[in-house]
Amino acid sequence: MADENWKPKIIAIICNWCSYAGADLAGGARIQYPPDIRAIRVMCTGRIDPLFILKAFQDGADGVLVSGCHFGDCHYLEGNFKAAKRMFLLKSVLKNIGLDDKRLRMTFVSASEGAKWGMVMEDVIKTINELGPSPLKEFAR
Amino acid sequence: MAEVKKNEEPRIGVFVCHCGTNIAGSIDVKAVMEYARTLPNVAIADDYQYMCSTPGQNKIAEAIAEQKLTGVVVAACSPRLHEPTFRNATKAGGLNPFRFEMANIREQNSWVHMHQPEEATAKAKDAVRIAVAKASLLEDLVPKSVPVEKAAMVVGGGVGGMQAALDLANAGIKTYLVEKSPTIGGRMSQLDKTFPTLDCSQCILTPKMVDVYRNEGIELLTYTEVEQVEGYIGNFDVTLRKKARGVITPAEAEARGIVGGGCTGCGDCVDVCPVIKPNPFELGMAPRKAIYIYHPQVSPLIYTVDFDACVKCGLCVEACGEKKAVDLEMKDELMTVKVGTVVLATGYDIFPIEKKFEWGYKNYDNVITSLEFERLICASGPTGGHLVRPSDGETPKKIAFVLCAGSRDSTGVGKPYCSRFCCMYSLKHAHQIIEKIPGAIPYIFYMDIRSFGKMYEEFYYRIQDEGAKFIRGRVANILEDPVTKNLHVNAEDTLLGRPIDMEVDMVVLAAAVQPTAETEKTRRLFGVSCSQDGWLLEAHPKLNPCGTTTAGVYLAGVCQGPKDIPDTVAQAEGAASAASIPIHRGEVELEPYFAQCMEEKCAGCGLCVNQCPYGALSLVEKDGRTVMQVTEAKCKGCGTCGGFCPGGAIWMQHFATPQIVAQIDAFLLGGEQ
């Protein structure tokens, strides 16, 4: 790892109904987790175009988290299934371009799983810390 | 379609909230505000103690007018909490309310990074930068109004569901009350008395059942289950399965052209039925025939054939004679009704307490549950109200009550929550024993007595005075004397600090309650979330305890969490009131997060059409080419089509691709590298 001061840049794109609500619940319960993730809210993970994630990596993101409702729980019936399919495909694309596919993660956190959100945060940040800076970082911009 | 103002220079106002010390305690609010001033497109940045207060909101309105803002960003709590507040403030300032974006620096920042002020402040700056990037690209949107069907549905016919249905119907709303069992009444009809007033449960319940049955505004659909739900607030299309009852009502008989026919509830069919099964209403402690009613006060008084048990001998058909009420060839029927709002009041089940094998339920004859106790002590129960030991029919004199049986249990076998009403009904049971059996002594093994309601604590003192014995300690195990079938209750008396081995005649387990087996199916049909313990999840635990995250669906009673009868009825009235509001308004506003087709980019491939779970998208011919068209009334704004379109031809209002990409770029490319 080149830079000792390096802090991972991780972006989370999360759905309004489950994961965003779960993240809010973690806040209400004052569950403490590391501060390296920035969240963007969408109504459903189904909204997430794989290009958004590629754009994030192109911009130099060290990791991307997509988090939605549990299967069967989607506020829009099946958006999370479709998102999961896309993420699955996208992971193989990432591997093909030489990026560790662990940098992209999809999780399922419900509106009542504040504690789980905290654990997901810990785990994602730990994974990215172990992987180090994204090799695409130097090409960013 | 929303108006997009072209060629306008974005001018964004940023307002950072201290929220007292909630935010300012770990985030340097002034630094975030100063930072906002350096961001592109920001015309004004300010901070305030409480942005949601009237002066805070006024700041927004004033800045919009003075600075000619095109967008507003408030960095404060979660948009799930205060987005509507600040949208209204934005509107009050003369700007379209959808030109507002919120940066969550409380729930997802200051509260979760309480001991890392530097990192939290940096994260807040990023959040503001991301929000400003989105706000710079927001456009005017107009919410869509849709009419609301003037009808409601209540699912579950227990005391909560009945109350909700009565309130809705009395408010002039046509109400469908759907109940899966053959009668309304629910759990409360199985109870003998109610605490703390010792009212007879059936006596106060049956008038309500009759009210429901007689109320012209209520269409009572017993022995019916919800099969499918489509639509949204104001316009739910609910498909119901009317299970084959095997018996027709007088009204149905008339429709079939049988004059003076249909079930009159005479019971002649029961006398001749040769099949005997355990009666689930009596928890298997009494027999019932294959053609049955649960109990004498059922409503509606119509018999039901249990087709799983029926041998189709036809004796009942003969006994019924000219009334021709019994139809053994009856099939399930599907029907669809349209309603504007729905109240779920689906109740609870008893935790299978045999899983706590150390207490020996189902192994030892004289260990029973509290609900079985209710039936045994009830005058209309299987023993005519004489409490007897199942092993020998003797009257028990020494009875142990085990409280928190499966509740407040973190061993993994039981439930971690308090079931809330077991303490009180066990006190009531103690009273009933003392009253009915001379010389009998109840021994109550408790962890804490939770007598929290009105007149509950006073009831507790009364039971103490009447002579019930209280032992503070959880029962470790129960062993049966194989000869006498007496039981040895082993516990620690934690107040005296000594172990106890008490021989008793009978043990009553105050078993925990749990969500019904159908809860999972119901909540998926209606798109309602559940909390970690499986109860249906309210929209907000304090400020919206009757609502759900699905607009137009409300909760009443124990399906939302354990509660006693007064609380269930209160919540049912609340839910009915909430469910009547959209119906009386006549229309609801839907958030205008619709998909729009950018026809110049659309290649007409149609891939998006299959992505939409609501069938809102279709291909049409327009100016000689094929393009996609959105039916706005069907679109719910998930954006699944927008995430899939290979040509980027779908504009998801408020979550458009340029807006999201701007957020991603703002985080990763903006700010300090």
Image: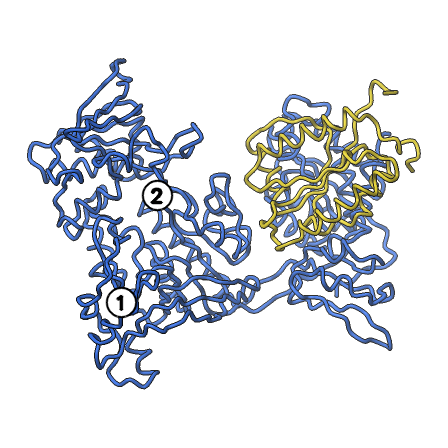
Disc 1 element: loop
In the image, is B440 to the left or to the right of B561? left
When asked about the image quadrant of residue B352, the answer is top left
- Chain B colour? blue
Q: Chain of mark 2?
A: B
Instruction: Tell me residue B464's x, y (percent).
Output: 17, 29
In the image, is A52 to the left or to the right of B421? right
Number of numbered discs visible in the structure rendering: 2
Instruction: Tell me residue A51's x, y (percent).
Output: 82, 47
Sooner in the amino-acid sequence: mark 1 or mark 2: 1
Res B398 visible: yes
From the viewer's perspective, is residue B135 above or below residue B240? above
Res B42 visible: no
Tell me the residue that label 2 is attached to: B350
Tell me the residue that label 1 is attached to: B303
Please tell me how crowded label 1 is: few (under 14), some (14-19), or many (20+) other residues with Cα within 10 Å: many
Instruction: Tell me residue B131's x, y (percent).
Output: 75, 42
Task: Pick the residue in front: B526 or B331.
Answer: B331
Going by the numbered disc 2, the residue's amino acid type is: Ile
Going by the numbered disc 1, the residue's amino acid type is: Tyr
Disc 2 element: strand
- Chain A colour? yellow
